[in-house]
Amino acid sequence: MKKLLIAALALMMIVSYSDAFAQGKATLRLGGGVITDGTQPGGGLGLDLNMPDKPISIGVTTEFYKKSGVTTLPVGVLALLKKTNENGKVTLLLGAGSGLVYSKVEVTFLGTTVSASTTKALITALGGIQFNFSEKAGFYVKGQYYRAITSGASNLVGIGGGIAIALGAE
Protein backbone atom coordinates (compact mmCIF):
# COMPACT_ATOMS: atom_id res chain seq x y z
CA MET A 1 0.00 0.00 0.00
CA LYS A 2 2.87 2.34 0.84
CA LYS A 3 4.46 1.77 -2.61
CA LEU A 4 1.13 2.51 -4.33
CA LEU A 5 0.76 5.77 -2.40
CA ILE A 6 4.33 6.84 -3.27
CA ALA A 7 3.76 6.02 -6.95
CA ALA A 8 0.49 7.99 -6.98
CA LEU A 9 2.13 11.01 -5.36
CA ALA A 10 5.06 10.90 -7.81
CA LEU A 11 2.66 10.67 -10.74
CA MET A 12 0.64 13.63 -9.45
CA MET A 13 3.82 15.71 -9.11
CA ILE A 14 4.94 14.86 -12.65
CA VAL A 15 1.54 15.63 -14.15
CA SER A 16 1.12 18.85 -12.15
CA TYR A 17 4.54 20.46 -12.51
CA SER A 18 6.49 19.19 -15.51
CA ASP A 19 6.48 21.05 -18.83
CA ALA A 20 7.39 17.74 -20.48
CA PHE A 21 3.80 16.60 -19.99
CA ALA A 22 2.08 19.36 -21.96
CA GLN A 23 -0.89 18.37 -24.15
CA GLY A 24 0.28 17.24 -27.51
CA LYS A 25 2.53 14.66 -29.06
CA ALA A 26 1.55 11.45 -27.25
CA THR A 27 -0.85 10.06 -24.67
CA LEU A 28 0.12 7.35 -22.19
CA ARG A 29 -2.75 5.24 -20.82
CA LEU A 30 -2.33 2.98 -17.76
CA GLY A 31 -5.19 0.95 -16.38
CA GLY A 32 -6.88 -2.24 -15.42
CA GLY A 33 -9.89 -4.27 -16.41
CA VAL A 34 -11.30 -7.70 -17.16
CA ILE A 35 -11.93 -9.97 -20.12
CA THR A 36 -15.67 -10.51 -19.95
CA ASP A 37 -15.54 -14.18 -20.97
CA GLY A 38 -14.46 -15.85 -17.73
CA THR A 39 -13.83 -12.47 -16.08
CA GLN A 40 -10.02 -12.68 -16.25
CA PRO A 41 -8.68 -9.63 -14.36
CA GLY A 42 -5.66 -7.77 -15.61
CA GLY A 43 -4.04 -4.51 -16.58
CA GLY A 44 -2.92 -2.66 -19.63
CA LEU A 45 -0.73 -0.02 -21.16
CA GLY A 46 -1.36 2.11 -24.23
CA LEU A 47 0.62 4.76 -26.06
CA ASP A 48 -1.06 6.98 -28.64
CA LEU A 49 1.09 8.99 -31.06
CA ASN A 50 -1.06 12.01 -31.91
CA MET A 51 -1.03 13.74 -35.30
CA PRO A 52 -0.64 17.55 -34.94
CA ASP A 53 -3.88 19.46 -35.64
CA LYS A 54 -5.73 16.25 -36.59
CA PRO A 55 -8.06 14.02 -34.53
CA ILE A 56 -6.10 10.93 -35.65
CA SER A 57 -3.58 8.90 -33.62
CA ILE A 58 -1.61 5.71 -34.00
CA GLY A 59 -2.09 3.67 -30.85
CA VAL A 60 -0.15 0.73 -29.45
CA THR A 61 -1.92 -1.27 -26.74
CA THR A 62 -0.93 -4.22 -24.65
CA GLU A 63 -2.87 -5.93 -21.91
CA PHE A 64 -2.20 -8.80 -19.53
CA TYR A 65 -4.97 -10.96 -18.08
CA LYS A 66 -4.56 -14.00 -15.83
CA LYS A 67 -6.92 -16.20 -13.82
CA SER A 68 -7.03 -19.89 -12.84
CA GLY A 69 -4.07 -20.92 -14.99
CA VAL A 70 -5.22 -19.02 -18.10
CA THR A 71 -3.01 -16.17 -19.34
CA THR A 72 -4.04 -13.88 -22.20
CA LEU A 73 -1.72 -11.19 -23.60
CA PRO A 74 -3.05 -9.22 -26.61
CA VAL A 75 -0.83 -6.60 -28.28
CA GLY A 76 -2.28 -4.37 -30.99
CA VAL A 77 -1.53 -1.41 -33.24
CA LEU A 78 -4.59 0.73 -34.00
CA ALA A 79 -5.60 3.75 -36.02
CA LEU A 80 -7.52 5.91 -33.55
CA LEU A 81 -10.03 8.71 -34.02
CA LYS A 82 -9.85 11.00 -30.97
CA LYS A 83 -12.51 13.70 -30.98
CA THR A 84 -12.43 16.20 -28.09
CA ASN A 85 -15.37 18.48 -27.26
CA GLU A 86 -15.01 22.27 -27.44
CA ASN A 87 -14.09 22.80 -23.79
CA GLY A 88 -11.49 20.00 -23.88
CA LYS A 89 -13.03 18.04 -21.02
CA VAL A 90 -14.23 14.93 -22.90
CA THR A 91 -12.51 12.92 -25.68
CA LEU A 92 -14.22 10.16 -27.66
CA LEU A 93 -11.93 7.26 -28.67
CA LEU A 94 -12.68 4.96 -31.63
CA GLY A 95 -10.18 2.72 -33.37
CA ALA A 96 -9.35 -0.49 -35.19
CA GLY A 97 -6.20 -2.41 -36.04
CA SER A 98 -4.33 -5.67 -35.78
CA GLY A 99 -1.68 -7.36 -33.69
CA LEU A 100 -0.87 -10.59 -31.87
CA VAL A 101 -2.48 -12.48 -29.00
CA TYR A 102 -0.50 -14.85 -26.77
CA SER A 103 -2.51 -17.41 -24.80
CA LYS A 104 -1.30 -19.94 -22.25
CA VAL A 105 -3.23 -22.53 -20.27
CA GLU A 106 -1.71 -24.35 -17.28
CA VAL A 107 -3.31 -27.34 -15.59
CA THR A 108 -1.98 -29.03 -12.45
CA PHE A 109 -3.03 -32.59 -11.67
CA LEU A 110 -1.52 -34.71 -8.90
CA GLY A 111 1.42 -32.32 -8.53
CA THR A 112 2.28 -32.27 -12.24
CA THR A 113 1.76 -29.07 -14.24
CA VAL A 114 1.10 -29.26 -17.96
CA SER A 115 0.93 -26.12 -20.08
CA ALA A 116 0.20 -25.21 -23.68
CA SER A 117 0.63 -21.83 -25.36
CA THR A 118 -0.06 -20.25 -28.70
CA THR A 119 0.51 -16.95 -30.47
CA LYS A 120 -1.90 -15.85 -33.21
CA ALA A 121 -2.50 -12.79 -35.35
CA LEU A 122 -5.55 -10.78 -34.29
CA ILE A 123 -7.86 -7.98 -35.31
CA THR A 124 -9.00 -5.49 -32.71
CA ALA A 125 -11.45 -2.60 -32.30
CA LEU A 126 -11.60 -0.08 -29.47
CA GLY A 127 -14.23 2.35 -28.22
CA GLY A 128 -14.01 4.56 -25.18
CA ILE A 129 -14.29 7.93 -23.56
CA GLN A 130 -11.65 9.98 -21.78
CA PHE A 131 -12.51 12.61 -19.16
CA ASN A 132 -9.79 15.27 -19.00
CA PHE A 133 -9.40 16.95 -15.61
CA SER A 134 -6.51 19.09 -16.89
CA GLU A 135 -4.61 19.64 -20.16
CA LYS A 136 -2.10 17.05 -18.95
CA ALA A 137 -4.15 14.28 -17.36
CA GLY A 138 -7.48 12.54 -17.21
CA PHE A 139 -9.10 9.17 -16.80
CA TYR A 140 -10.66 6.87 -19.38
CA VAL A 141 -13.03 3.94 -19.75
CA LYS A 142 -12.93 1.66 -22.78
CA GLY A 143 -14.09 -1.55 -24.34
CA GLN A 144 -11.81 -3.45 -26.70
CA TYR A 145 -12.70 -6.35 -28.99
CA TYR A 146 -10.13 -8.99 -29.97
CA ARG A 147 -10.47 -11.79 -32.52
CA ALA A 148 -7.62 -14.15 -33.34
CA ILE A 149 -7.32 -14.78 -37.09
CA THR A 150 -7.74 -18.55 -36.99
CA SER A 151 -10.63 -20.94 -37.40
CA GLY A 152 -12.47 -21.74 -34.19
CA ALA A 153 -11.13 -18.70 -32.34
CA SER A 154 -13.36 -17.10 -29.75
CA ASN A 155 -14.15 -13.42 -29.53
CA LEU A 156 -12.61 -11.63 -26.54
CA VAL A 157 -13.98 -8.40 -25.12
CA GLY A 158 -11.95 -6.49 -22.57
CA ILE A 159 -13.45 -3.67 -20.53
CA GLY A 160 -11.46 -1.37 -18.32
CA GLY A 161 -10.25 2.05 -17.44
CA GLY A 162 -7.44 4.01 -15.88
CA ILE A 163 -5.43 7.21 -16.12
CA ALA A 164 -4.32 9.05 -19.25
CA ILE A 165 -1.28 11.34 -19.29
CA ALA A 166 -0.37 13.76 -22.10
CA LEU A 167 3.32 13.60 -23.07
CA GLY A 168 5.38 16.16 -25.01
CA ALA A 169 4.64 19.76 -25.89
CA GLU A 170 2.69 20.71 -28.99
Image (tube, rainbow, N blue to C red):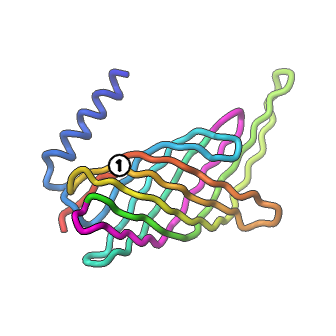
Q: Is residue 40 above or below residue 78?
A: above
Point out the image quarter for the C terminus: bottom left
Residue extending furthest toward the right:
110
Task: Tell me, yes or no, whether the highlighted magenta stretch contains residue 105.
Answer: no
- Across and down, in percent, residue 11 comes to 26, 40
**Residue drawn at x 66%, y 35% as measured from the top left:** 67
Q: How many marks?
A: 1
Query: The residue tagged with tag 1: helix, strand or loop?
Result: strand
- Across and down, in percent, residue 59 comes to 43, 65
In depth, the one of 14 and 158 nearer the eye is 158
State the predominant SS element of the stretch in magenta: strand
In depth, the one of 129 and 157 nearer the eye is 129
Q: Quadrant of residue 144?
A: bottom right
**Residue drawn at x 33%, y 21% as measured from the top left:** 2
* Left/right of residue 46 with respect to residue 62 in the rendered view: left
Label 1 Cα neighbours within 10 Å, binned few <14 / some 14-19 / many ≥20: some
Residue designated by label 1: 139
- Across and down, in percent, residue 133 comes to 25, 50
Q: Which span of residues is magenta-colored?
A: 66-88
**Residue drawn at x 75%, y 57% as measured from the top left:** 154
* Left/right of residue 29 with respect to residue 153 in the rendered view: left
Q: Quadrant of residue 82?
A: bottom left
* Left/right of residue 159 with respect to residue 46 in the rendered view: right
